[in-house]
Image (cartoon, rainbow, N blue to C red):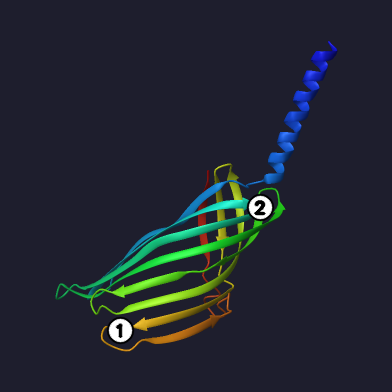
Amino acid sequence: MKKLFLVAAAALLALNVNAQDKASKGLQGTWWAGGQVAFGKSDNGVSETKTNTFVPIVGYFVAPDVTLGLGVGVIGSKTDNTVTSTTTAESSTFIVQPLVRKYWGLGGKFFFFGQASLPMTFSKDKISDDKTTSVGLDVAPGFDFIVSKWMTVETSFSLFNVNSTTYKPNGGDSTSNFNLNFNPFDLNPGTRSVGGLRVGVKFLF
């Protein structure tokens, strides 16, 4: 009987230690996936513009409250003159965006996070063959709500960003410009929108 009691006690202790270890790790070791997929079309009677965006993002929790991620994708745009049936503008942009995110618990399933990303874009005008390269730094706070063990809903907005852009025309000299923005809120009357507000779903696996 004593041996049986000792075995049962050891099993309960092992389960408790394992549960505590799992709780302390949180989402550490968890992969996640999100991103953006969008298709748009506008027509003013003279020209028709089609746009498509496909930027998947995959990340990994390296600590209970820290995750690293990488987004890679493309954005395409094409404008056709509906009167002459000719293409007046067409461009393609390749995007690479590494990011790091830190979480803080707000109680229950709500979390606040701060994210820093390094978006890099490489664009080409398919008509003129002009090229544009951009490298930036974006700091974005946000909120995350855990819906289930495999899905969360999050929202964030751009708080601060810097951007360096180089424009290389076909057959001409390159030009560069640098922008710094710290304006998370649009204060124009009638809009009052949050700068770069993003809402999305993240899948955990």
User: Which residue is disc 1 drawn over?
Assistant: 169
Q: Is residue 121 above or below residue 63?
A: below
- 39 relative to 148 in the view: left or right: left
Residue 14 location (% of width, % of height): 74, 29
Rendering quarter of residue 82: bottom left
Question: Please, what secondary structure does the residue beneath circle 2 have?
Answer: strand
Q: Is residue 145 above or below residue 44?
A: above
Residue 196 is marked as: none
Residue 150 location (% of width, % of height): 55, 43
Q: Residue furthest top?
A: 1
Q: Amino acid at mark 2?
A: Phe
Q: Residue furthest left?
A: 84
- 119 relative to 143 in the view: left or right: left
- 52 relative to 61 in the view: left or right: left
Residue 3 location (% of width, % of height): 82, 14
Q: Residue furthest front?
A: 3
Q: Is residue 194 visible?
A: no
Q: Are there few (<14), some (14-19), or many (20+) residues within 10 Å of tag 2? A: some
Q: Are there few (<14), some (14-19), or many (20+) residues within 10 Å of tag 1? A: some
- Residue at image coords 36%, 78%: 132
Question: Please, what secondary structure does the residue beneath circle 1 have?
Answer: loop
- Residue at image coords 37%, 72%: 122
Rendering quarter of residue 171: bottom left
- 125 relative to 202 in the view: left or right: left
User: Which residue is disc 2 drawn over?
Assistant: 110
Q: Is residue 1 above or below residue 96?
A: above
| Cα distance between the residues tagged 2 and 1 | 48 Å
